[in-house]
Amino acid sequence: MSFELLSPTEMSEADRLSIARGPHDGPALMRNAGAAVAREVLSRYPQARTVHVLAGPGNNGGDGFAAARLLAQAGVDARVYCEGRPVAGSDAAGALADMRLPLLGFDAFAPEETDVVVDALFGAGLARAIGGAYAQAVEKANASGACVVAVDLPSGLSGGSGLVLGTAIRAGVTVTFFRLKPGHLLYPGRALCGDTVLADIGIPADVLSEIGPRTFRNTPELWRETFPWPHSGSHKYARGHVGVFSGGPSASGAARLAAISAARAGAGAVTVLSPKQAVQVNAMHLTAVMLKWIDTPEEAVNFAKDRKMSSAVIGPGFGVGERCVEFLLALAGLGAESPFGLVLDADAITSFADAPDRLFEALAAIGAQTGRERAVLTPHEGEFRRLFPDLADAQGVSKPERARRAAERANAVVILKGPDTVIAAPDGRAAINVNATPFLATAGSGDVLAGIVAGLLAQGMPTFEAAAAGVWLHAEAGARFGPGLIAEDLPALLPAALSELYNGDRTSF
Ligand SMILES: NC(=O)C1=CN([C@@H]2O[C@H](COP(=O)(O)OP(=O)(O)OC[C@H]3O[C@@H](n4cnc5c(N)ncnc54)[C@H](OP(=O)(O)O)[C@@H]3O)[C@@H](O)[C@H]2O)[C@@H](O)CC1
Ligand SMILES: Nc1ncnc2c1ncn2[C@@H]1O[C@H](COP(=O)(O)OP(=O)(O)O)[C@@H](O)[C@H]1O
Ligand SMILES: [K+]
């Protein structure tokens, strides 16, 4: 499956460019869309005798008319309900004229549990909250227990943001066209779509070069070419050296989780940088990972320079406060001689809650030194709110857009975590992750993610790609375990996920 995602505006641009280039005009695209929906209904629900088609006033309704015509031709009892009529001369009006089935009002809509409902009320053109008779029809469909096949999007779901406007239909299957939309992958939308089927309706892929999509599904195709596999001439120093800052004696586990994960992700060397009081406890638990006693920011910077550290993780278990701020500001000065990647998680984010601009300025300095942002922030929604309170509360703004604005402001790649983790870069690229499992919601899981990303950064992978690959690998590892997963399990699950990537076992993800 392709990885570009199109906003409703970009999708209508794709329609427009495709129609301008031919060979399919608007009515032909609509017939193809209707045929894809009818095909899905007939193949999934061969026993269904009655199919209720809810048609809206725009082209989404037009797809519904086109599907109803084919369903009736196939011998199905197709009943079509419509309140407003399509605008005269529109493609939808043409599809209605071709359909030749009676139009019923929404009052007559009373689906049984064993029926199928085709939801063609609103798709890309949903402009405001659904209300009135449309909302009642949506509620009736949801309450009926009938299987719903949504055309393009479950009605009420915003294709751009994945947010619900007013109310929304709950679909068992969603048939969408040409490319997926962000709303199919972002919650709550993802949960409303059921299975999402992507249908080819004849729009040529080369329209994308003119549209230039900036939002993607996070699949290996997005970053595979930049993945840092070792080659025959590699030696451990060429594979990067990661430093992971440890907290005190009662908070050192997070750093060790991040450290072993960085090593599993392929870093040639990993050192836990530990305060004196925690050196002993760290020493008892580390084998391949090295250990260095570091008490001051100056010692950290000197060690990083002497031992050619190429990335660092700071935050997990480190402790919130001025000490963390001082370490971070010192590390931000690295990178003048060679690229230095910095992953900021947990306490390193929270430590700047009172003065986010201080952090953003420091990260801008890294960018200025290395020519590109080399820092990654990994907030969950709570941590995001501490640094970007205005963006956290922005009404109706999608998760990718919030992450993008944050990335631009922070001069860093932002991994905004959750069931639909978004990775965003200051240049406007954003990827939505789709392979996670809820079993990843376990203490320490975020520390593992921070370590994986640092491991990839240390090997020279570009920042956005390293962040996206790290999120994918973390989720893939979690998905391989399932129930009972704890964070300690994750590093040992990485080799299988990496092998699959390395061997190219799966050609499409
Ligand atoms: N172009 C093509 O060739 C192809 C397009 N395709 C299909 O077209 C779909 C997009 O069609 P679309 O742009 O007409 O939008 P659509 O989703 O039907 O809604 C717009 C209508 O709804 C109305 N409306 C909006 N919100 C409302 C609300 N809350 N409550 C009440 N009314 C509301 C709005 O009215 P207005 O806002 O103007 O008052 C307008 O009348 C796309 O999803 C795909 O299925 C495919 O066939 C492939 C080829
Ligand atoms: N419901 C969920 N489904 C999938 N992944 C989830 C879910 N909840 C959390 N995660 C993932 O689990 C990880 C938790 O990280 P974080 O909240 O930082 O935990 P911790 O600080 O305990 O390590 C993140 O990668 C996040 O995306
Ligand atoms: K719909």
Image (cartoon, rainbow, N blue to C red):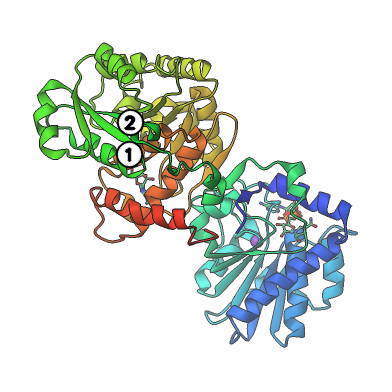
Whole-percent x, y for residue 306 in the image = 31, 17
Disc 2 CB within 8 Å of nearest ligand 2 atom: no
Question: Which image quarter holds the N terminus?
Answer: bottom right
SS under mark 1: helix
SS under mark 2: strand
Do the residues bearing badges 1 and 2 touch, measured as CB atoms within 8 Å? yes
Along the line of sight, which residue is nearer the eye, 242 or 408?
A: 242
Depicted 364 relative to depicted 208: above or below: above
Q: Residues within 10 Å of mark 2 (few under 14, many from 20)?
A: many
Q: Mark 1 or 2 closer to N-term?
A: 2
Along the line of sight, which residue is nearer the eye, 217 or 42?
A: 217
The residue drawn where x is 70% and y is 41% is 212
Mark count: 2
Q: Is residue 380 visible?
A: no
Q: Is residue 436 visible?
A: yes
Depicted 46 relative to depicted 469: above or below: below
Depicted 412 relative to depicted 299: above or below: below
Using residue 111 as the reference point, say whether residue 252 is left or right of it. left
The residue drawn where x is 37% and y is 48% is 474
Splitting the image into 4 quarters, where does residue 350 fall?
Answer: top left
Using residue 362 as the reference point, say whether residue 10 is left or right of it. right
Whole-percent x, y for residue 156 in the image = 60, 55
Most extreme residue toward the right is 89
Tag 1 residue: 262
Most extreme residue toward the front is 233
Q: Which mark is residue 41?
A: none
The three-letter code of the residue at mark 2 reads Val
Q: Which mark is residue 242?
A: 2
Depicted 479 relative to depicted 358: above or below: below
The residue drawn where x is 27% and y is 52% is 492
